[in-house]
Image: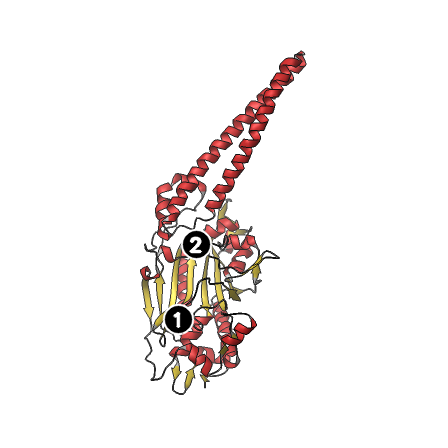
């Protein structure tokens, strides 16, 4: 059982400064400096508040004396104290404004601090420093003349990227014929497998408000990944994790109802700013793509056992699709803003000769729950934050890419047996 850590709060930063700095530095060294900035602002803010309270206390004391002088008929003395009171009120306004300014500056930095990585997270800042913890399946040997998926797509008229560019822009493909049927088959297969595993299907909205984006850590949008509908101040979802997890925002759950398990299929929208080059050809990186997401709301004592359960679920999907895959334990610098621990799944693309990420499965501990104010009433009758987890089960584009490439033959593309009942054909020819 992996040991849980305390929630990242202002009080935690005060009491465990060095531990917080060391852990946050695993994600990026700059976060350690941000902790110092937070604590400096916190000290200044508390000093300003103390001065404001002292100012108010003096003003209250003078008000009492003014009342006494007025009763005794000493109007001159009362007027002198009134002048002092006016000065205190004026300086009090300045102290109040300063206090609010410091509070806002403190908040602005706090919301940029990511979740602290779990103790087991490897040190590192790049994908090359991730650790492979499991690998399954043999790398397929392709026939002479095998080609990458973007050539197969054209050959069999499965997806039209140029038409998508005409309609919308680059990164918005149009699936056609057997390509569209295969896409729908995978969605239904992934949903059915999740439902068999006890997940309740939901169909959430594809746009969320700012509160929802903040709750799961997508806002503030530090990397410019979110599509923002500015007129209505709504955001296109980058993953179903956002609307599904926000079902439980501002909710107090019953302990006996945990864990809660949801699955949802949605299109996902990501700007992927700066994503260019040969490695993003075809289906390797899109602005709109389909994904089935599993989400669990868990008791803190059970969340890491549940993470292992979710990993097993994703492994089962990939094995039923007959794809070679590996699992990576992500280093701190390659993890998401909200994650405490993440396992990435990659399938091997034989025609491209490289591994492609197809799933991230993460435990966020109570980082998202703290933003969402999602709690449960424990046995002592006190409200306690839940833990949130999610996983891609699965993201479709790179699954389709590796499936097309690895199953190509001189006679066509073989469809994995698990998908044949869903798509109605066993070969693309």
Residue 156: percent from the left, percent from the top? 47, 83
Residue 56 vs residue 135, the one in the foreground: 56
Residues 237 and 133: in front is: 237
Q: SS of the residue at dot 1? A: helix
Residue 232 vs residue 385: left or right?
right
Q: Residue furthest bottom?
A: 411
Residue 400, quarter of picture: bottom left
Q: Residue drawn 33% across and 56% down?
A: 124
The residue tagged 2 is 337
> Which residue has dot 1 on it?
278
Q: Quadrant of the N terminus?
A: bottom left
Between marks 2 and 1, how big is the CA–CA gap? 27 Å
Q: Residues within 10 Å of mark 2 (few under 14, many from 20)?
A: many
Where is residue 342 shown, x and y percent of the image?
39, 59
Residue 313 occupies quadrant = bottom left
Element carrying mark 2: loop
């Amino acid at each position: 059982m992996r040991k849980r850590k305390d929630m990242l709060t202002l009080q935690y930063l005060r009491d465990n400064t060095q531990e917080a700095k060391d852990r946050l530095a695993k994600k990026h060294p700059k976060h350690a400096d941000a902790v110092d900035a937070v604590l400096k602002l916190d000290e200044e803010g508390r000093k300003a508040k103390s001065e404001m309270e002292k100012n108010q206390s003096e003003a209250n004391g003078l008000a009492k004396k003014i009342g006494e002088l007025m009763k005794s008929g000493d109007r001159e003395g009362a007027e002198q104290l009134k002048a002092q009171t006016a000065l205190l009120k004026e300086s009090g306004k300045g102290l109040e404004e300063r206090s609010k300014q410091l509070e806002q500056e403190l908040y602005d930095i706090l919301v940029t601090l990511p979740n602290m990585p779990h103790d087991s997270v490897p040190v590192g800042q790049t994908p090359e420093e991730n650790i492979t913890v499991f690998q399954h399946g043999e790398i397929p040997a392709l026939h002479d003349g095998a080609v990458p998926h973007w050539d197969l797509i054209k050959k069999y008229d499965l997806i039209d990227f140029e038409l998508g560019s005409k309609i919308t822009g680059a990164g918005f493909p149009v699936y056609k014929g057997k390509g569209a049927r295969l896409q729908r088959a995978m969605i239904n297969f992934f949903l059915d497998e999740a439902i068999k595993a006890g997940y309740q299907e939901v169909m959430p909205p594809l746009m969320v408000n700012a509160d929802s984006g903040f709750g799961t850590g997508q806002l503030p949008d530090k990397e410019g990944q979110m599509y923002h509908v500015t007129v209505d101040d709504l955001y296109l979802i980058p993953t179903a994790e956002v609307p599904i997890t926000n079902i439980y925002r501002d909710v107090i759950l019953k302990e006996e109802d945990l864990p809660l398990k949801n699955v949802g299929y949605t299109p996902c929208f990501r700007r992927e700013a700066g994503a260019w080059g040969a490695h993003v050809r075809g289906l390797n990186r899109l602005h709109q793509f389909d994904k089935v997401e599993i989400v669990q709301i868990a008791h803190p004592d059970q969340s890491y056992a549940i993470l292992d359960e979710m990993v097993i679920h994703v492994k089962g999907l990939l094995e039923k699709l007959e794809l070679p895959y590996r699992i990576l334990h992500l280093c701190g610098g390659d993890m998401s803003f909200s994650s405490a621990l993440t396992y990435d799944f990659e399938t091997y693309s034989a025609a491209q000769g490289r591994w492609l990420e197809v799933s991230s499965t993460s435990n966020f501990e109570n980082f998202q729950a703290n933003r969402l104010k999602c709690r449960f009433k424990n046995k002592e009758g006190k409200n306690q934050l839940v833990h949130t987890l999610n996983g891609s089960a699965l993201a479709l584009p790179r699954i389709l890419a590796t499936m097309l490439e690895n199953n190509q033959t001189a006679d066509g593309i073989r469809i994995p047996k698990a998908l044949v009942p869903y798509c109605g054909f066993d070969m693309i020819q």
